[in-house]
Image: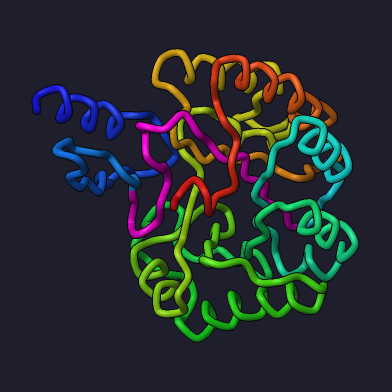
Amino acid sequence: MKKAVFIILSFLMVTSTFTISSLWNIESKNGFLQAQNKVVLGGIIRADINNKKLSLTFTGHEFADGAETIMHTLEKNNVNGTFFLTGDFYRKYPLIVKQLQDKGHYMGPHSDKHLLYADWTKRDSTLVTKDEFVADVENNYIAMTNAGLNIEMPKYYMPPYEWYNQEVSNWAKELDVQIVNFTPGTTSNADYTTPAMNNYRSSEQIYNAILSFAEKESLNGVIMLIHIGTHPDRTDKLYNKLDNLIKELKSRGYDFVRIDELLK
């Protein structure tokens, strides 16, 4: 029991961009305590840590410069990924998104117009009304349908800016949609940063941070966020290291699965 408590507390102390007020959903299975999903403000940020599985999860809004490289790399390594894309992305790149689903990847919404739902400094302050939120999500799904996609079940949703609060999660659940978010600590989500930003991280730094996280804590159950495209000012693209990353993690025994398989 003491060991189980120590493990739980250790994960709660992981450095992140969130104010972590989360908990592990735990159930008894075959007489043992089994950690399930780690939840923050109603959103799942990590799956079962007992399984050596993780999900490569890609988000996109404006840019798609990495789409071909990512598709080729995933296919080459026999990996199914997860893509959360905005309505604007689905409307702008219908051929890309159809290819992605045809190749077996999970396709989900990421806000129709990439709205900011919650205040950056006062997270419990919601910046959209319920009606605005519902319209934003529903229009994202409409854009998916208009692009010729089938709506994946169950419905998972990664919020724009990967930022939300409990109220937003509650609204999503009323739509039978479960919010998910990246697992903090790997820094993979920093692949959008440009050299002019104070928080800039090079692809080499991010790559090394991922491997360091794997060694110190493990990548079991991790939702790893990478962007399908980034601003032209960032010429050092993390997706160009994706092939090496997948091969390295596979050599360490990790399996890559879609978000729906990771969370089932």
Q: Residue furthest bottom?
A: 131
Q: Nearer the viewer, residue 120 or 13?
A: 13
Instruction: From the top left corner, tell me how far across and down residue 42 is, in percent.
Output: 34, 59
Horizontal side, residue 60 vs residue 19: left or right: right
Q: Is residue 161 magenta?
A: no
Quarter residue 220 falls in: top left
Q: Residue at x 51, y 14 (%)?
A: 212
Q: How many marks?
A: 0
- Whether residue 77 is visible to the viewer of this picture, yes or no, is yes
| Colouring used for the render | rainbow
Q: Is residue 53 above or below residue 87?
A: above
Q: Nearer the viewer, residue 146 or 262?
A: 262
Q: Nearer the viewer, residue 190 or 119?
A: 190
Q: Is residue 114 above or below residue 242?
A: below
Horizontal side, residue 178 vs residue 22: left or right: right
Figure quadrant of the N terminus:
top left
Instruction: From the top left corner, tell me how far across and down residue 233 is, in percent.
Output: 83, 36
Q: Is residue 240 above or below residue 61?
A: above
Q: Is residue 46 magenta?
A: yes
Which portion, as a residue range, is magenta? 39-61
Instruction: From the top left corner, tell me how far across and down residue 85 is, in percent.
Output: 69, 59
Q: Residue furthest left?
A: 1
Q: Residue furthest front?
A: 30
Q: Is residue 83 above or below residue 187?
A: below
Magenta segment, prevailing SS (helix, strand or loop): strand
